[in-house]
Amino acid sequence: MDPARASQAFFGGAGNPNPGVTRGLLDIPGWEGMTVTQAAQAVQLSAYPDYYAKWETSARAWLSELG
C-alpha cells in the first residue's frame, strides 16, 4: 500500500526496509544478466514464474514513451 516502501523492498540493498528478512534485486548475485522475468521471479518468488514475461514488451514501450 506504500509505493516508496514497496520499491525499497523490491530493490533491497542498503535501502531494504526488511534487512535480513527479505532480499531485493540488488541482493541477488548476477541480476544484471537476468531477463526481466527472471529478475522479478528471483525477488517476488511467485507461484507463476513466467507471469511477468507477457508485460515486458509493453513495459519497455511505456518506459520509452515516458523517458
Image (cartoon, rainbow, N blue to C red):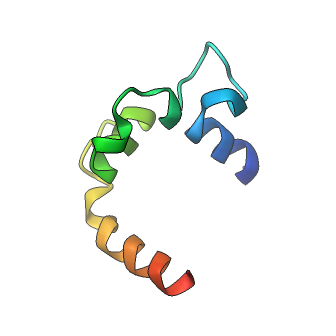
Which residue is at 44% across, 37% downward?
Answer: 44
Which residue is at 62% across, 13% downward?
Answer: 20
Please give left or right for residue 8 compared with residue 48 in the image.
right
Q: Is residue 2 visible?
A: no
Q: Is residue 50 above or below residue 56?
A: above
Q: Is residue 23 above or below residue 57?
A: above
- Of residues 50 and 61, the one nearer the viewer is 61
Instruction: Report x, y in % for residue 21.
Output: 60, 16
Q: Is residue 29 visible?
A: yes
Which residue sits furthest bottom?
65
Image quarter for residue 12?
top right
Q: Is residue 35 above or below residue 57?
A: above
Which residue sits furthest top?
20
Which residue is at 42% across, 28% downward?
Answer: 28
Q: Number of callouts in the render? A: 0
Which residue is at 41% across, 71% downward?
Answer: 59
Q: Is residue 7 above or below residue 58?
A: above
Please give left or right for residue 36 compared with residue 10 in the image.
left
Image quarter for residue 56?
bottom left
Image quarter for residue 45?
top left
Instruction: Report x, y in % for residue 10.
Output: 57, 40
Please give left or right for residue 48 compared with residue 44 in the image.
left
Which quarter of the image is occupied by the C terminus? bottom right
